Amino acid sequence: MSCINVIEKERNVVINPLKTCQPFGAMFAVTGINKGFPIVHGSQGCSSFVRYGFARHFREPSEIAVTSLHEDAAVFGGRKNLVAGIENLAVRFKPDLIGVITTCSSEIIGDDVYGFAETARENIRKTMGEDAQKIEVVPISTPSFVESHYKGYDNSINAIVNHLARKDEPNEKVNIIPGIVNPGDVRELKHLLSMMNLEGIFLTDISDPFDAPLRPSTVTTKPFYPKGGVSVDEIRDSANSLGTVSICKYAGSGALSLEKEHNVPAEIDSPPIGLQNTDQFLRNLKKFTGHDIPDDLLNERGMLVDSMADNAARYLFGRKVVIYGDPDLTTGIARFVGELGMEPAMVCTGVKGPEFAKDMDKIAKETGCNMDVMVGQDLRAVEVYLKENPADLMIGNSDGRLISLDLGIPLIRVGFPVYDRVGYQRQPIVGYRGGLYLMDLITNTILEKYYEPTHWKLQQ
Amino acid sequence: MEPIIETFESRKKHMCIKGEGISLPVCDKASLPGTVTQRTCVYGGARIVLMPITDSIHLVHGPIGCAACTWDIRGSKSSRGDLYKKGCSTDLKEKDIVFGGEKKLFETVIELNKIYHPGAIFVYATCVSGIIGDDIKAVCKKSEEITGCRVIPVQSEGYQDHNKTKGHWIGGDALLDYVIGTREPEKTTPFDINIVGEFNVAGDLWGIKPLIEEMGINIISTLTGDSHVDEIAQAHRAKLNIVQCQKSSNYVAKKMEKKYGIPFIKVNFFGLEQTVNSLRDIANFFKDPDMMEKTEKIIRSGLKEVEHKTDEYKKRLDGKTVALYVGGNKAWSLVRAFEELGMDVMMSGTKNGIKEDYERIKETVKDGTIIVDDANSTELARLLKKYRPNLLISGAKEKYISLKLGIPFCDFNHDRISAFAGFKGFESFAKEVDASVSSPVFELTRKGLGN
């Protein structure tokens, strides 16, 4: 009987983390709003190091304001900085939405962010008049010392939805909470929706803000805001959708709020990575909307299955894979490699969540493999594990590159951050087409590493 | 007077043009809340100064983000292992905020010592550890007694100051208070020096070190590029400190002069002329005829080695304009190097400059150069749009602001991959600058599809 073996963390210290703190998730979420501006209520490092991280991964500029808290604020509170910060931001950028993101320091000193935001709103109403009316100011509580970046993402989506969603006429749309994914993934989700003749409201949509075109017009007049992102009006309208699909089990609060407050039914599931997870995603869409899955989409599915039939048995069967990274991503990938006949020998996430071990247990039963599972662990744990338990392949972010190099195990780069290769942020791994891409990447890596390059001219 | 670009009233005085009225910008002020400042925190400043000590563990006492966003992000190379590249955190949680994080810190230090047996464990304070009042010094002392490993507190609470340079100083203080002077060298020579403020980004140190050693000089330690903590411990026996990054490290050099009587000279190994001057300045300090002779020989062969190698690049770069927007030191130390390439420095700015830094910039740049302090992302974009330099030199956060405007960019920060210091470094520098400026891509960015 196949089962999972949960390997507990046996030390205090985190070495080479696989998670970061809550504000990161909030900055990511707010960036996905059209004319949305994140302002971090904390030290300058809280925004600048995250901007640096975004820039390295997405290769795009990232605009995140900060209230620049200093010593006096730690003693007297950050009221002055936050009120002035929101005002300056409003005057300078005239955004549609300001996401006020708290940090460890502003939470500990007990700043009344809601109150300060209200004061700032009143002030800008006085100074900006009409223009101020449409600026939404959304306080987002993201104490860095509670849970991880995923909680911050979840808290943001929930805060934004709760602040904006308004019941009105039904809109025949479906809400999607994509999780912390790449622009390529969001675009692939949009493709799936459009194939099903559906319109989606993405909560939120980072596809364009984190992958923006360079056109002669941007060269001469760089706008304050990149194109795209979900609009504030669309978020308001999310209360009138047919349903909400969160493809991230670690960020379902927004979906549940919409269900509770506005009777928008929610489905919170694993991301559509691989064949069966994509099937399930489409079934969820169908369930909410009644739209059929069209023939063209069945052809896309067929192409993935065709490729799996061509290659999986021959090259991939029984290969041991170690997967690490964000919990939803690793869950999706573990199931997919299982579908390919590979063994997800060990799956590690830096984030803690009760769902994770349960999901892994399901995958172990489905694949018939015994799996080692690490929850709330780090890359040091992955390294130690791999030294004792060799594997054929690693799948995870660029931070595992040195382990890959030391142990001679090839690394397939997915998730965040990928900084030592280009284009990964643009390539989807969700949907049938994303599955094809990921499978080709895995197969070619296996061919390159484990097959004779001088083999005769037959197919390997 | 017409403002240089449109911005907030209070920000206008942070920009000026040399030779037109006031030639020094207002500086060293807190950034305006609500703007996208390019600055970072005091912790970040301390971390980048100490992180290049390669045999040490750098432990961040705070919530996970402070370590998660900053580990292994500095391209300081090592010739001996990669312990310093690890990202270690106490991962402070709610319970620790309420009951204090000292016990967790203590246990974490013990664990790290057991796993790695490092040369030292540097413990960085963060905003949180500061606000909850953890006594990091006491924990470090106690765990040092138990482990026998150097455990060094770095009082780098992030919110302490608007200026990251304060963090550089705090990093320096940690070395002054706990490391320097704690070990005696096995042998001394009349020509012992420390290289201070050289962090071996992309291997810069390795372009400088052989030149200095060939002069007959013994390098006791580098602060802090490619160094081990025991080497820095012997730094007090040097006869001279040479300071490369004067923004971060004049502070340490001055303190060492006061405490140990070690004089210091400022050097600059970016550019041929500056490299030559720096080598001569070091030789002149020791006034040893043999060394002076050797130095001239090194200079001759160094110059010969790169002679004509940059001609092609210079031809293409001649008359091209460059804007510098950097942490501090490079705002003046790179100016001559660009002039040697025939380029025109049209703007020089820093994120964290203090008055003496801007005086330094003013001395170095020619009339008509824009001098900018703490430009936020909008101001930077406006400056770039208005003046359209042929090249921007800055860091990772500015890189894509510039590229999105179709303005060539060259990384001179942590992400740099080629060493630029010394004679050979100048050739790589010319090559990389040329690759950025002369790429055909930046012609295409301006062209549309047409009709």
Image (cartoon, helix red, strand yellow):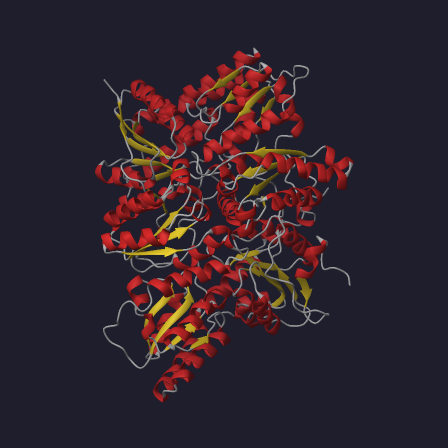
B383, above or below A191, in the image: below
Across and down, in percent, residue A328 comes to 42, 28
Q: Residue furthest bottom?
A: B289
Point out residue B72 in the picture as x, y percentages from the top left corner. Answer: 40, 50
Q: Which quarter of the figure is the C terminus of chain B placed in?
A: top right
Q: Nearer the viewer, residue B349 or B290?
A: B349
Where residue B16 appears, x then y in whole percent?
68, 64
State the image coordinates of residue B339 (x, y, percent, origin top left).
58, 71
Residue pictured at 50% horizontal, 15% vertical: A284
Quadrant assignment, res B229? bottom left
The single residue placed furthest to the left in the displayed view is A388
Could you say which quadrant of the image residue B325 lies in? Answer: bottom right
Is A441 or B145 nearer to us in this picture? B145
Determine whether A279 is above or below B334 in the image. above
Residue A256 can be seen, yes or no: yes
Q: Where A51 sits versus B282, above or below?
A: above
Tell which of A219 and A236 is nearer to you: A236
Q: Give the total number of marks visible in the rendering.
A: 0
Name the residue: 46% across, 53% down. Answer: B44
Quadrant of the image containing the N terminus of chain B: bottom right
Q: What residue do we see at 63% from left, 15% from top?
A: A172
**Residue A208 in view here:** no
